[in-house]
Amino acid sequence: MFVSTKDGGTAISNIRDGLSNMFNVADIKPALRHMSLGLLCLCSLVLQAQGNRIFLEHANSTNFDKNISPDYHFLIGDVQFRHDSARLYCDTAHYYRADNSLRAFGNVRIEQGDTLFIYGKTLFYDGNKKLAQLRNNVRMVNKEVTLFTDHLDYDRVANIGYYYRGGKIVDASNTLSSDYGRYNPDTKMAFFKKDVVLTHPQFLLKTDTLNYNTETGTASIISRTEIEAENADIIAYRGWYNTKTDKSLLLDRSYIISEKRSLTADSILYEQSLDIGEAFVNIELIDSSRNTTLTSDYAFYDQSNNYVLLTKKALLREYSGQDTFYLHADTLLGKQDSIYDTFRAYYNVRSYRRDLQGLCDSAFYSTRDSVLQLFGNPILWADNQQISGQQIFLYTKNQHPDYMEVEGLALLASKEDSGLFNQSSGRKLTAYFLDNKVRRVVIEGNPESIYLPRDEKQKILGMNRLENGSLYIFMDKEGKVERLKVSPQPKGKFYPLQLLTEEVKYLEHFSWPIHLRPTDPADVFRLTDRPRAENMSTNIEGAAGEGANAPDRAALRTFKSKNSK
């Protein structure tokens, strides 16, 4: 039995004082009190020493030399130790009783309870610190989790195992390796540092620093991390990835990259098994195959079905031409299949390109026929020309405008000198393009026209008002009217400039809302007081037929319902 000098001296002093006072009857009670206190202290110290001591439970043979070192024992064969709740097994051992430590060799095994088992070839164990240092072919087994290394330090007080010369942890789904690592069987948390690799049947994760919960299968991303998968790769800087559910939260401008597309945002919720995700704030979706970039503050993304929905400052940028095309709407929807692409824009649509600007309530485009359809009283501006109607169909060829059909209250207008306008209107207007500029216009269905002829010095001579027949307008490269043809013979009247009145200056449905025209790329986000068209519901439903529209309209209704709560 070993006790400390300070506490043991106090206990013995109390007993001695008690014995000396027993011969004085008057002091017998105090004497007994001193003795009781001393015995309690000694018992406490004895129990404490026994609880911290390593006990030898069994060995086939024990060797020691009491003259050289009576506290050193060399143990051989089926050696077993006990230290509080832990049991230690080995083939041979050096047992240092005074130091309360041992060295074990061959088939080393530590058992703590019925859930933690540690194996190795050699062991040094410090019973005072409760520290086990195992070397060579070490395994630490905690139910379905196994740690492999050649150098393991196991702190029994903290219940944490450390390795620092390379190791790995294997659970039911993943294998995680690194230069340095630690594992806590109580919390199920593992920490990995330097050259960290997580191997999963569906992906490979590489990083410098990683936290991992073996119970939930969640990897906490705290440094730059690369995740390589079949459908897409991920570059993440902070967040988490649940390897059991394939769900992840990616923060700090992380990326999801596929063969032709990349997605980044301030935060991304991503489900790898379904290849779907939601992104929030400062979103950028780049499609290199189609030279487009989509940005917004909210997006839903379905990679497997090639579907994307964007809202909150949604913007499309298209780079295929010589100039960038910008389009903004409250909501943008895009879908691709093996053959065709479709694109929809809903509500408050505004677009800008240096040579063409426009607005409408909704738009639809499909590569099936390469037609851009604009609904809800659309307006287009090019140079000093304005085209408007109830709906517009712009036919493209090789990603350039070929011709355009305007239906319902079609109007073509251009501003001339002195606040006057060339104007042409009818039920249907067809405009033909050459080098991205309108060069010829045909107006049918009760056409009317106001034409301002000029003399050789380009001075306006007066105003011609024409009606009936079909109207043919020919323009120069600058968009100015070169000549006008009406067939059959129209009704018309010429007004000298000095006889012009407000009643004859404008056609019935003339409008020149130049204040609504987008002036630059940033201006597509400007909110205006333009009322929504009354025929919007009919136009949206009829954009490309019920069968083509039904799935996306359902998605839009679900999205609007979800975000209106």
Image (spheres, rainbow, N blue to C red):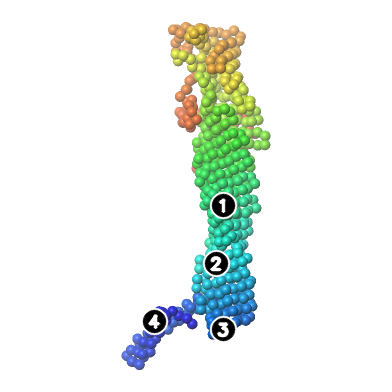
Spatial CA distance of label 1 from label 3 is 54 Å
Q: Residues within 10 Å of mark 4 (few under 14, many from 20)?
A: some
Please identify the residue farthest to the left as the structure is shown: 26
Spatial CA distance of label 1 from label 2 is 25 Å
Spatial CA distance of label 4 from label 3 is 34 Å
Q: Amino acid at mark 1?
A: Thr
Which residue bears the numbered disc 1? Answer: 207
Of callouts 1 and 2, the N-terminal one: 2
Spatial CA distance of label 1 from label 4 is 58 Å
Residue nearest the viewer, comparing 43 with 552? 43
Mark whose residue sits in front, 1 or 3: 3
Spatial CA distance of label 3 from label 2 is 32 Å
Q: Where residue 351 sits in the image (x, y, percent)?
A: 52, 29
Q: Which mark is residue 65?
A: 3
Q: Which mark is residue 10?
A: 4
Of callouts 3 and 2, the N-terminal one: 3
Name the element at disc 3. strand
Spatial CA distance of label 2 from label 4 is 37 Å
